[in-house]
Image (cartoon, rainbow, N blue to C red):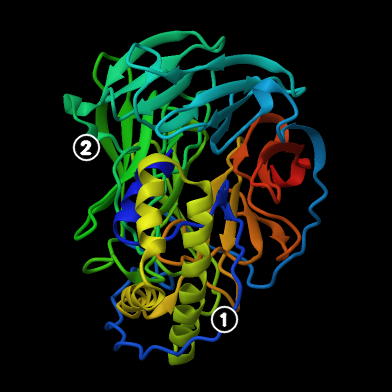
Amino acid sequence: MPIPIGLVAVAVIGVGVVRMSGRTAVDRTRTEATAEPVPPPAPEAPTEPSSSSHPPGVQEVVDLPLEDRPLTADFVEVFRVGGGSGTWQEFTDITGLGFDAGGNLHIANAPDFGALAGVIVSPRGELVATFGRKGDGPGEFRLVGAMVALADGRVVVSDVGHAAYHIFGADGGFQRLVRFPGGQPSLDPTSRVFWDGNEMSRILKADRSGNLLSRMPRTTSVSSDTAGGIISARGNTVEGPRQVERILLDGDEARTEIVVTGWDPPGPTRLVAFAPKFLFDALPGGGVAYSDSSAYAIGIADPSGKVVRLLRRALEARPVTDDIRRDYRKRRIEAAHVALSEGLERSRGLVREMLERAASAPRTLRDRRIRNNIENVQFYPEIPLVDDLRATWEGTLWVLRTPEDGYPSESVGLGRLAGSPAPIDVVTSDGRYVGTFPALMAVMPVAFGPDGLVAFVQIDEFDVPTVIVKRLPEEVR
């Protein structure tokens, strides 16, 4: 999980971090009166792939209904763990969740910088096994990048310090190490730190096969597909392409192969607000669903990478106006001060020292640095319509839309903003529109499992996380 590396990178450039609950931020910003910075001129509108015409090579285009069909979020709670209610449940910072085919939930807890204490929980909420600890030996972590649970119950943990993936069995026992491609930490998609607009966190997911999906800013999210490797998105902070990459763990050294290449926004996206994200997830059978532009257009690729279907909704694009630029900058200036103080409360070691130095700077100097960085933010010409994309265990898509009066969620950034409540569309990968959860009705699960199981992370006022597992009704699985 990216938190340790990301915090260091963030502290170096004077960025404040707001705590995340799964992919949903806990935003505690307070409003203060601030002067409005003068926005720089907006960049010219880039040419995006058209969602209103039949894209070359796509076999089928499905136009989804424009009018929402409301769904009710009647999710039955199955169990909850955490909240410091027992030794193995004393979670500090949950950095990854994933189900296996048996419904067991794998939890990555980061009790210290670069460490991971893994827990496996049964479908009834009982402890099955623990795995991993800090150290230099096999099965011990030096600097953890990410964790993903595989369908057969095994667990893969990337470790930058070892430049390898640790593989654990369903019983928590260490099995073997697989070196990163070339044996280099920089070649691990779950440990690279890039900047995609304001997002540089890593997310881990898993499907039924033993592969991973990794998304990083302009690159990765990690999950498994059904072809026997890992899937990750790759890209460059300066120039593309943005690609979905399968990472195979069948030997002593990981092998990679490109599956899907997405559209690449022209020019760098660093410090460009509202730049389109490259979102994707694995589908049953080895396919991939992805979103790569500001339009509501979801590509469906088969295991070979051929885009066989495009799902689209003719929702109206929202241009970025001067009022939006001023409001966005104001919110981020306000959030930066709160993020700095909250980051100081949670941090330890080197990160804490760096944040203490930033916090001890004279208020006028600190404010000037924050304002200068935020004033330099450029803007994509329109706000993306899709903010997140997930696939259920059965392959149904959950599409989180950007709020009609809000902004896309940001994982990291100088005073970055949390995502506001927004509608979630439920669509099958073959193009059947199931319905929409209205804003405030439901939130995106952190992990999807078999038989409709989903997991959420809830953080209380003392920053103590609890994992809540619920079961979805069949129509939205």
Binning the other alpha carbons within 10 Å of mark 1 as few (below 14), some (14 to 19) or many (20 upward) gives few
| Image coords of residue 329 (percent x, y) | 44, 79
> Which of the 4 image quadrants contains residue 123?
top right
| Image coords of residue 454 (percent x, y) | 68, 38
Amino acid type shown at disc 2: Ser
Q: Residue, x 59% and y 68% (percent of image)?
A: 29
Badge number at residue 186: 2
Q: Earlier in the sequence, mark 1 or mark 2?
A: 1
Amino acid type shown at disc 1: Glu
Q: Viewed as shown, does residue 345 lie left or right of 37?
A: right
Helix, strand or loop status at disc 1:
loop
Q: Viewed as shown, does residue 267 lie left or right of 410?
A: left
Number of callouts in the render? Answer: 2
Helix, strand or loop status at disc 2:
helix
Q: Viewed as shown, does residue 409 lie left or right of 438?
A: left
| Residue behind mark 1 | 32
Binning the other alpha carbons within 10 Å of mark 2 as few (below 14), some (14 to 19) or many (20 upward) gives some
Of 222 and 365, nearer the camera is 365
Residue furthest out toward the left: 182
